[in-house]
Amino acid sequence: MAARRGSSGVVQVGIYTRISKDDEAEGLGVARQEEDCRLHCAARGWEVAKVYEDNDLSAYKRKTVRPEFRKMLEDLKAGRIDGVVAWDIDRFTRQPRELEAWIDEYEDAERRKRHLVFDSVSASDIDLSTENGRFIARIKVTIANKSSADTSRRTKRKHLELATQGKLPGGRAPYGWNREDRRTLVPEEAENLRKAVKGFLGGIRWASIAREWRDKGVRSHSGGVFDDSKIKRMLMNPRICGYRMHQGELFLDESGAPVVGDWEPIITPDDWYLLTEKVRRESEGRAVRDNATKYLLSGIARCGRCGTKMRAFPSYRKSKTSSQFKYACPGKNDGGCGGVARAGEPVDRLIRNAVFLSSDKALASVRERAPEWTKEEQLASLERDMAEFKQAWQEKRMSAARYIALTEDLEQQIAELLRERALHRAEAATFAAGPIDIRGRWENLAIEQQRAAVLKVFRAVIIKPASNGPIFDPADIEPVLR
C-alpha cells in the first residue's frame, strides 16, 4: 500500500510538539519546536497535515495522559497521516512501552506494504520504518527513560529535604507573596485572601467570593481570572498559614507536629484548621452545587399546600411600589402544585424581624467563657511516649523497624489531636467574641450570611395559600423553629 498523498501530491505527516514544564505558560517551547519541524518537513518535500501539541505534559510519568499523542496514533492507524516528525525522540516519548506500541504499528504497516515515515529534527538516524532506526530509537528512549528516572529520584529526595527543613519548593510565587523572594507578602493580595477566609467561615460561598474578585478586577500573577475552585485550592493549601506541604499533604515532623515554613503566613493555623474542617463537613453533607443565591428564602420557603420547596422569581413591576420578586411553588411538571405564590418583600421582612428577635435574646443571655478542651493531658501523654521512643531509637536501644512500628500510629493520633485543639481554639475565640449582632450588621452581610442566620433559627418557612386576598397576612406565614 503506497503512502497517502495530499492535495499537492506529497506525503502527509503529523508534527508532534511537547514540553514537560512550561513555566511561562505561553507555549513558546512548543512553538519553536513546530517551527523547526515545519522547516524539516519542507526540506523533505512532506506536507504537514496536522500539528499535535501536548504542552506542559511529561512523557516520562506513566499516569500522565497525553491526549494529542494518543490522537496522533489513532490518526496514523486510520490513514489520516502517513508518519510523524518530532524535534527529538525524547520529545516524542520517554517510555519504552509507548515506543513499542508505535513500532508495532510501523511493522504492521510494513507487512501490509504501507509506507510510513518517521523523522526527528535533531537526529536523522531515528526512523521507525527501518530495522536499524527502530534499534536506535529503542536505545535512545531507554537512555532517556533512565535519565528521567534518575532526575525524578534526585528531585524527590531534594523536595523531601526542603520539606523537612521547612524551605520553599521550586516554582513561581503563589498569589499573596512577592514574585522576587516568594517569602514576603504582597499586602493587597494577602488582604484579599484573609477576607476570603473570613467570608467563607462567615457563610459566603466560593462562587460569591469568586464573583466579588472578578468585579474587583483581582488577577493572578500571570493575569488570569480566579474561579471558585482556584480560590478554594489556595485557601486549603497549608502554605497560607505557614505550614509546609509535601506531595499534596500537610508535612509533619518526627513528633507529628506540622513543619513550619520559612515564609510569612497570611492567616493563623487555627483559622486554617477551622476552614478545612468547614470544607470537610460541607463536602460530606452537601449534595447541591455551590451556586450563588440571590434571594433570602429560596429553597427555605415551602409551599403550604403540597410542601414543595418554593422558588423565587423576578416580578413584572406595574408601579414603583409593586413587588420586585415573588416566592412561588413550581408547577406540576417540576414536582410542585403551582398553587401558591406570594410577594417576596413582606415575607422577607417578617422572617428577618424574627431572626433579629432571636439574635437579641442570644446577645442578652451570652455566657462568659467557652468550655475548656478536655484532651490536653491525652496529647501530652502521647507526646511524651513519642519522645521516649525517639530517644530509645537514637541511643540504639530500639531497632528502626520497631521504632517505626510503634510511632506510626502515634504520629497520626498526635496530628489528629493537634487539629482538634486548633479547631477548639478557633471556635473558642469566636465564642469569646459573643454572638453576632445580626440586627446591627444585617445590611452589610452577604446574602449567604443572611440565609445562614435564617437557617440557624428556622428549619423552613411555610407559606400558606392567601387567606385575605392580595393583602399580606402574617398568619399565612408559618416559620418552623429548629
Image: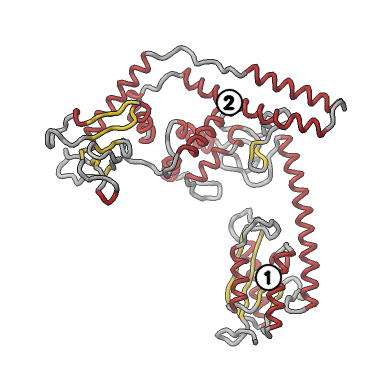
Position of 446 with respect to 66 (left or right) is left
* Circle 1 residues within 10 Å: few <14, some 14–19, many ≥20: many
| Residue at numbered disc 2 | 420
| Residue at numbered disc 1 | 86
Question: Quarter-wise, where is residue 439 in the image?
Answer: top left
Q: Position of residue 406 (x, y in %)?
A: 76, 29
Q: Position of residue 134 (x, y in %)?
A: 77, 74
Position of 260 with respect to 277 (left or right) is right
Q: Which of 291/43 is in front? A: 291
> Disc 1 residue type?
Ala
User: Which residue shows up at 55% across the image and 26% down it?
Assistant: 423
Q: Sequence-wise, which precedes: disc 1 or disc 2?
A: 1
Which secondary structure, mark 2?
helix
- Total numbered circles: 2
Compared with 393, 103 (above or below) is below
Q: Position of residue 129 (x, y in %)?
A: 73, 78
> Disc 2 residue type?
Glu
Question: Quarter-wise, where is residue 248 in the image?
Answer: top right
Compared with 167, 27 (above or below) is below
Which secondary structure, mark 1?
strand
Q: What residue occupies the far front of the structure in this picture?
A: 306
